[in-house]
Amino acid sequence: MPIMSSCSLLLLLLLSNAKSSMGHTSNVQVPANLSTRALVRDVYGYSVEPVWLNSYVNSSLMATLLQGITDVTGKAPPIRIGGTTSDETYIIESLPGNATSAETTKPEMWNVTASWYSTFADYFPGGTEIIYCLNFADNSSGWANAQEQAQAVWEALGDKLVLFELGNEIDHFISEGWRAHGWDVREYIAQFNSVTASILDSSWYTEAGEVAPKFQAAVFADPPWVPDQQDEIDNFDIINLTREGLVDPEHKVIETYSVHLYPQSTCDTERWLRMRLDLLSNHTTLWLNVSQYVPQVAAADAANTTLVFGETNSVSCSGRSGISDTFGAALWGVDYVLLASSIGMPHVYFHLGAEAEYSAFTPWPYELDNETLCSGIRANFYSHYFIAKVVEGLGEDESYGIAALPGANSSDLGGYAIYRDDSLAKLVFLDLGVWNGTQGLSNPSTLSSTDGTVFSNGTRPSHNMTVRSSWPPGQNVSIIRLQGPGTNAKSLVSVSGTTFEMTTGEKLGTEVEEYVEVGDGGVVTFHMVQAEGVLLQAVRNGTNSSGSGSSPVQSDGATDGVSRDFVFVVALSLALVMVA
């Protein structure tokens, strides 16, 4: 799974330590001419490993949580059913005992019947758009297995199914033994075109008409600027893909491209030793990871096709308790989703496994490392609810415009301006400075062995932030806060006092109302503690609205609003990666 090279990591540590020692700025200017990209209502989605889907849909927890998000945003979070076991899934006529699915270990297979697809057809909130990943690894009999799966899932889901993927992380197919050496973009395109043509020519697809699912192409794992983590060296990236001709600007077949990203990993000893919470909850680290996709977005834009993070999370190979399930991971999740949108990647799908340490919620108790973990909600879920508040207020087919703030771009501070039409609507600030507190250290759904034992000294730092905006003097601004007792906290997290019942997912509490008034020159002043997220929203007639102010420059270019300091850091890190 992708992470940064050691040279880039060294550079990051030097820059991060230098900036952290000075502390982040308390004064931020919102420039008048920021370039924006789309921020949509369903920006935050989930990717569910197929072998774990039964566990989720046999519990009401996930459905309740997703409905709570939908009630705020007005649109259900998108769901991708895909992962490693997608390319081990086989549809068969029947299973013993009328079962609809069964897992085998030798060989590793996930066997399903056509009836399995109906088991989750009505589980998710109304309006949920589902992506299903077909088995592309098995190319026997002209991909007959994939074609049979495609028909079965369509017949079960109907127009809830919006996209197919062909294979998961196809740039790892050589190391998995599913393709021979020499597997590359050109061969992938030929096989992709062959399978999609067969599906499009099928009778069920023709009968589906305009609502027939399109395809999400690519589904690449390895990052473009870091050498592959597998033994194979290949040319899989969006630039090469589009250069070789897999483009569909009218979206007759291809609707989107997908890439995957995991900033840290437990997959091998070397990367295990590099895992650190303070490198996850770090805006500079995130810049360096996400920025490498700016040229990939440009290539997708040129093909008139959206690029998304189709699978991601904090730590690959199922996560790491004490990092993935903390409040620091919640702050990282918010920063990640907003940053991705600001460079032109409007959807981010966080991966779920019913027994994975990075999962935002787990549906059933299970055993791990000699501990019995309860079902429940983890701290990182609150990133989703906070994002829901950020995108709240949009109607059907509407989107905000978002831009990263150049003046809020350091290791411990990230900031974003959000526009509605020509007006500043919202501002988001994330203090990612690490504060390890002594409260909220445990959560019955996480490993107790990873509960915090090292704590920050003294009093938790705080700042009186001053932001110069385009809002007029006297404008009322509401404040929503993503709060936790510390970066290391696994519980006691809330969004302005709103929490979720650990086992049922029901929303609890009343949102604490907090307001400030814009001063002369558009100045907004508010208090912020270390390790906290703050959403500022213009208020009109007692409700949050789009506010008012000068117009941002709308642009299809992903890099126009990037700060010069960031460009320098990216260029230097790229140079180090290339010589590593």
Image (cartoon, rainbow, N blue to C red):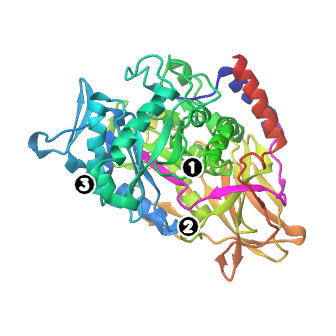
Which contiguous range is marked in magenta?
21-49
Taking the spot 67% from the left edge, 35% from the top edge, the residue there is 292
Q: CA distance from mark 1 to mark 2?
A: 20 Å
Q: Which residue is mark 3?
A: 118
Q: Secondary structure at mark 3?
A: helix
Q: CA distance from mark 3 to mark 1?
A: 33 Å
Nearest to N terminus: mark 3 or mark 1: 3
Image quadrant of residue 365?
top left
Instruction: Give, as a three-letter code, the residue at label 3.
Output: Ser
Q: Is residue 120 visible?
A: no
Q: Which residue is mark 2?
A: 397
Q: Nearer the viewer, mark 3 or mark 2?
A: 2
Q: Where is residue 219 shown, x and y percent of the image?
A: 49, 37
Taking the spot 30% from the left edge, 32% from the top edge, the residue there is 142
Tell me if mark 1 has few (under 14), some (14-19) or many (20+) residues whose alpha carbon lies within 10 angstroms of its own: some
Lateral position of residue 278 relative to residue 14, left or right: left
Nearest to N terminus: mark 1 or mark 2: 1
Q: Where is residue 347 shown, x and y percent of the image?
A: 55, 51
